[in-house]
Image: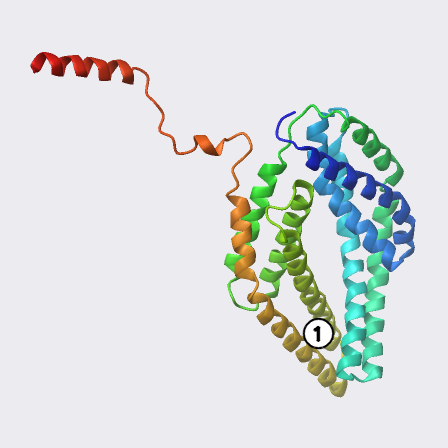
Amino acid sequence: MAHATTQTIAALTSSLRKNASTLTSSSHRAKRGEVRGIHRLRVATRRLREALPASAELALDKSLDSEHILRDLRRVTKALGPVRELDVARTVLADVAEREAWPAAVVARIDEYCERLRAGALADAAQAIDTFDAKATRKSLEILLAKLDHPTGGSTLGTRRREAARILSRQIEEAGTLYAPTALHEIRIAAKKLRYVVELTGEPAPGSLRRFRALQAGLGRMHDAQVLQHRIQELAATSGDRGFVATLTSMERTLETICREWHAKLLKTLPGIRVLADAIAREVPPAVRPSGLGRPARMIGTKRAAAELGRRRSRIA
């Protein structure tokens, strides 16, 4: 078996088994609109999209249409995204409203607006879940799990790990120090993808996963506040009540200030995260032996040519 370790296979097996089970246990709850069910199903589809390709490579399972399964998983992930964002935005609204003592009547109107948007997003998500056969997908994954007991193929997880690290490093560099929500969101996505691969392949250094999780959590909290900020802006744009709009504008500015404060703290951690990502990107593939690196190659005929030169010098002397 090439390019795979017992640790990686164990991590892949655990991820497939756990998240395949979540597909069937959370699909109905998510379709009904349960907040926890939506979150669990979305996380499961994201993690399976990371573990499935590597598992199929190791099992050399040509009968499994992994591309079809990946498309279905991606479709469900995408459909659940807007619902999940609105769920978290409403939680942020409740927390900040209590801390900042925002007017209860205005907070209620914002929450009602988010709830209406969620109802529409949930209808779209329910349709996507209806067309997704969770039981059939779980059965296919269980067959793949059995084949992982005796893997015969190789894995590209190492390559994906290095590429994910390069992407994260590049996103951090491109974001710079300016407060730019879109660029920061790209860092969050890149950090999440690298974290998922590292969970499957093992930490490059103690505490690496903890640092990735902390970065992802910090950026996630900021993104959630930004989503709420955007919804408040939308609501203000549809109202002709000047007093109401003025209150919304004040709320939106408070969220902006909070996000910028979080960003200032986050900036202190980004250089260290980039150093870690760069180290992962420079990892030597297992097929290359470090002891042989940098050693000059011997050209054919070099020994013979050196001997002939020695004889010539002897004759001249």
Residue 284 against residue 251 in the figure, above or below: above
- Residue at image point 73% right, 42% down: 49
- Spot occupied by residue 230 in the image (x, y as percentages of width and height): 70, 70
Q: Quadrant of the N terminus?
A: top right
**Of the residues shown, which amino acid type is indicated by label 1?**
Gln
Q: Is residue 26 left or right of residue 7?
A: right
Give whichever of 313, 70 is nearer the camera: 313
| Residue 136 in sight | yes
Secondary element at image label 1: helix
Residue 187: quarter of image: bottom right
Give whichever of 161, 122 is nearer the camera: 161
- Residue at image point 60% right, 61% down: 184
Residue 184 against residue 159 in the figure, above or below: below
Give whichever of 80, 61 is nearer the camera: 61
Q: For the residue carrying disc 1, how many other residues have a C-alpha within 10 Å: few (<14), some (14-19), or many (20+)? A: some
- Residue at image point 82% right, 71% down: 113
Q: Is residue 125 left or right of residue 162?
A: right
Q: Which residue position is annotated with label 1?
A: 233
Residue 237: quarter of image: bottom right
